[in-house]
Image (cartoon, rainbow, N blue to C red):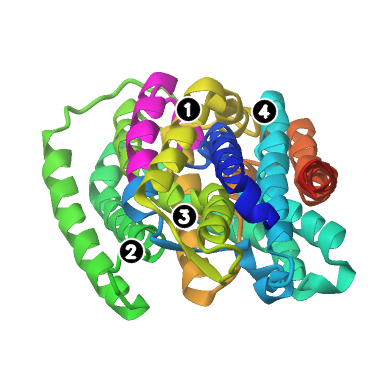
Amino acid sequence: MSIIAQYGEIFIWMACIFGFFMAWGVGANDVANAMGTSVGSKAITIRQAIIIAVIFEFLGAWLAGGQVTETIRKGIIDPALLEDDPQLLVYGMLASLLAAGSWLLLASMRGWPVSTTHSIVGAIVGFALAGLGFDAVDWSRVGNIAASWVVSPLMAGSIAFMLFKSVQHLIFENRDPEQAAKRYVPLYVMLVGFIIAMVTLTKGLKHIGLEVSFSESLLYSLLFGCALMLLGIWMERRLAPSSRKTDTFGFEGVERVFGVLMLFTACAMAFAHGSNDVANAVGPLAAVISVVYDHGDIHGAAAVPWWVLVLGGGGIVVGLVTYGRRVIATVGTGITELTPSRGFAATLAAATTVVLASGTGLPISTTHTLVGAVLGVGLARGIAALNLKVIGTIVISWLITLPAGGGLAIVFFFLFKGIFG
């Protein structure tokens, strides 16, 4: 009797528990990508952010989280190498889930915004080294992922810098900022609508059988952006004028408009994040279920039962509610002081970078992207506007994420191998 047949039910139960733990870590740490700038700029309260994120993260994970997912995230190792010893894949996926979840727990307790994707990738690299040897890892893939540490923050930071400078020049430095806002904000609304639609079509709906090409996504997103611009013009005319200054650069009414825009971007980012990053938790879980149900047969991709997506979405929600506010505080207030207009520039820059990466196939981290965007906004106001101590801590946590996940996975892999092998 094989080990998989003997302990199959136990493996599935363990995978469900560890998968939920990993999804908890995604919710506790990564949801700050969607909500940190909105809360930090006081566009919405932490309570409102949690309600929005709970709804849209869960819907994204459940509705668009993927019917089929890679058994091994990002193609780090070839599943064919495990065909002779399928139980090694089970040990490896269990170890990877527990290792990545443990690292995310530690990072969330400290308020460090780290990449959940890099956490699970580091864990899988560790398992591959322990179970299959150095040559089993596709190091070029790992190199591409490591390169994103530099590429995604730089790209998002540059876009955020230019966006905020344009807002500052066109609106806040105008003789009449409120009139300038009425003139230019509809264009920003159209840009928000376009990017929201692109993020959702390229990242959020690719798994539900909706075959939309990149060029079709561009067309639909442009139409959606124009429709939202018309809606924005109508809503703008209903806003009561305000002449009370609440910010160094402009009027309360102007910032209020950007606060409304941030609400749209936060909802879209939460939906896209839930649909995309739930795979970090349910991918390894689906791999274990697939191997047990198929009596040891290993495939490059595995079907994901609906209840697994619900489990992943539920874990994200629980993580957000219990620990999410710590990382949200770091992203929203720890790096630089945010207002709705600055937060809008950062969030829109992060969403734009996600769209560009989806179109070009560039591997990026949403966490690194948003932190880079917030840095770009801070730099637009001068280096003194940045908290360099917090930034240094964040960069160190990024650098140790891959080795931390890998080291923990090696320990857990040998532990499970010793228990069941």
> Left or right of 318: which side holds 406?
right
Residue 44 counted in the magenta span: yes
Looking at the picture, tell me which residue is in the foreground, 384 or 274: 274
- For the residue carrying disc 3, how many other residues have a C-alpha within 10 Å: few (<14), some (14-19), or many (20+)? many
Q: Picture coordinates of residue 37 (x, y %)?
A: 49, 36
Locate residue 96, reporting x and y percent: 70, 48
Q: Residue 209 falls in which quadrant of the image?
A: bottom left
Spatial CA distance of label 3 from label 1 is 18 Å
Which of label 2 and label 3 is nearer to you? 3
Q: What's the distance in space between the residues labelled 3 and 4, CA to CA?
A: 22 Å
Pointer 1 residue: 318
- Seen in the picture, residue 70 relative to 368 is either above or below; the reply is below
Mark 2 residue element: helix
Residue range (magenta) = 35-59
Task: Identify the mark nearer the N-term, 3 or 1.
Answer: 3
Q: Would you say 67 lies left or right of 185 here?
A: right
The residue that appears at 51% across and 61% down in the rendered structure is 353
Pointer 4 local density, CA inside 10 Å: few below 14, some 14–19, many at least 20: many
Quick one: label 4 or label 2, which is nearer the N terminus? 4
SS class, disc 3: helix
Q: Residues within 10 Å of mark 1 (few under 14, many from 20)?
A: many
Q: Earlier in the sequence, mark 2 or mark 1?
A: 2
Q: Please tell me which residue is depicted at 55% across the width and 47% down the height of the picture.
A: 281
